[in-house]
Image (cartoon, helix red, strand yellow):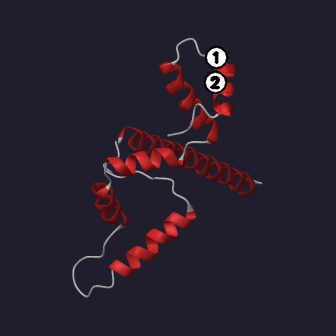
Amino acid sequence: MVSRKCGQQTLEMLINFFERIKIMVTNELKVVAKKTSKMSRSRTPNVSSSPVRIKQTTKARLNDLLSLLNKHSFGRKLKPDDVISYALRLVNETHVEEICESVLTNKDRLERLFHATKKEHRNLTKDQFYGLLMEGKVTMS
C-alpha cells in the first residue's frame, strides 16, 4: 500500500512538473512571438524599390532584352531597373503626348472636340454640336 501511494505521489509530482514546464514554454513562446511581431511592425523597411504591375507581354519583352544585353563577357549583369531607367530618360514631350492619345477612347475624343468647339461657339449645346459634326462643319484636327 505504501509503495502504491508513493508511486501515486511521484506520478502526481511528475504531472505537476510537466504542466509547469508546459506553462513556462507557452509563456516563453508568447514572449518571443510578441517580440517578433513588435520588431516587424516597428522596423521600417530599408528597401528602395517597389513592385510595379506590367503585362506579361511587356515582361517577356523586357526579359528578352535583358538576356540580349547580358551576353557581354565582363561587368555586372544588367537589371530590369537599369533598362527602364535608361528608357525613361529617352522619353520626351512628343512621346508623352502619343501615350496620352493612345489611351483615349472615341468618347473621350468626342468630348474633347466638343469642349474645343464650345470655346469658339459660346452657349453651344451637345445637340447643336452633333448637328455641326454631321454637317461636316466641325472636324477632328
Residue 94, position as x, y percentages in the image: 35, 49
Asked which secondary structure carries label 1, the reply is loop
Q: Is residue 113 left or right of residue 79?
A: right
Write the residue at 35% across / 60% down: 84
| Amino acid type, mark 2 | Phe
Near-viewer residue (103 or 12): 103
- Location of residue 91 (image quadrant): bottom left
Q: Residues within 10 Å of mark 2 (few under 14, many from 20)?
A: some
Disc 1, disc 2: CB below 8 Å?
A: yes
Residue marked by disc 2? 129
Asked which secondary structure carries label 2, the reply is helix
Write the residue at 68% across / 54% down: 11
Residue marked by disc 1? 125
Q: CA distance from mark 1 to mark 2?
A: 6 Å
Write the residue at 70% across / 21% down: 127
| Amino acid type, mark 1 | Thr
Residue 69, position as x, y percentages in the image: 33, 78
Write the residue at 54% across / 39% down: 140
Residue 9, position as x, y percentages in the image: 67, 49
Q: Is residue 65 left or right of residue 11?
A: left
For this orientation, the residue located farthest to the bottom is 73
- Location of residue 76 (image quadrant): bottom left
Q: Quadrant of the N terminus?
A: bottom right
